[in-house]
Amino acid sequence: MASPLMNESVWFNQQKFEKAEANYQQILAGTATPGQRTRSVQHVQQITGGGGSAPPGKMDSLERENRELRKVTDELRAMVLKLENRVSALERGAGVPAASAAAPAAAAKPSKPAAADDDDDDDDDFDMFGSDDEEEAAEKERLQAERVAAYKAKKASKPALVAKSNIILEVKPWDDETDMKELEQKVRKVSTDGLKWGSSKLVPVGYGINKLQIMCVVEDDKVGTDFLEEAITAHEDYVQSVDVVAFNKI
């Protein structure tokens, strides 16, 4: 009876081939022992000598993988060498001052001729727009001076704020026979710059005696309560005393 696998392409040596491939990679890496090398050769001979052959597609795939692995290995080796060189350079330059380290670079840089340096200095000194900048600065200063002058003139034209106070005085007579109308006239005759009299009224004290309560507005810088008291009590025939009942700033 015919085998059902006789017409199928079956690779019976896959395990041996993979083992031989592992040995081959060890040989490439230099880690294989002489015995492993011999066994690897025997495995390859057994695989290629009989018992079936490896599919061509598998061989191509393995070759591509080997090439890719070698490429990756070479890149890694190059990166390791580059890192080692860089670390060595950093270790060598760790104790060197920055100025001395920069000296070789400055020495390696070609210097310009002296004539060229002179030309560069001349070019730096030459300012194409210098005159414009000076004119703009002068114009700004002029505008600022005009604004300051206008502000001062406006401030000077405003009337200065005058501090004023509202004062209520109580003027007491000697007795009930004092003419209160005459007393009030005497009080209102007290006149000076910064003093303006206001309303008044009579307030009963007792025993038929009234006192005069009168209001005035004064400029604080010109008139004080001491002046008012002295000026009113100067009419001693009518006035006994003067008291400040209220004093409020306006």
Image (cartoon, rainbow, N blue to C red):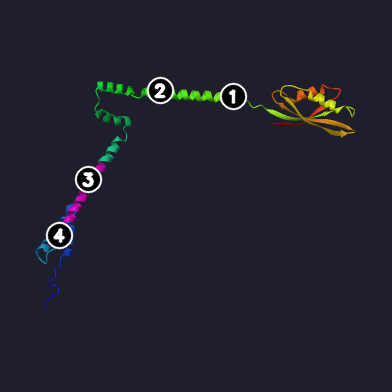
Where does the image place residue 233, in percent across and percent down from the top left?
A: 82, 23
Where does the image place residue 35, in percent across and percent down from the top left?
A: 15, 57
Relative vertical location of residue 84 with respect to residue 127 in this rendering, above or below: below
Residue type at mark 3: give it: Ala
| Alpha carbons under labels 3 and 1: distance apart | 87 Å
> Mark 2 or mark 1: which is in front?
1
Q: Report helix, strand or loop for mark 2.
A: helix
* 185 left or right of 177 in image: left
The stretch of residues the image draws in magenta is: 60-84
| Alpha carbons under labels 4 and 1: distance apart | 107 Å
Residue type at mark 4: give it: Met
Residue located beneath label 3 in the image: 78
| Alpha carbons under labels 4 and 2: distance apart | 85 Å
> Mark 4 or mark 2: which is in front?
2
> Mark 4 or mark 1: which is in front?
1
Q: Which numbered disc covers residue 157?
A: 1
Residue type at mark 2: give it: Glu
Q: Earlier in the sequence, mark 4 or mark 2?
A: 4
**Magenta span includes 77:** yes
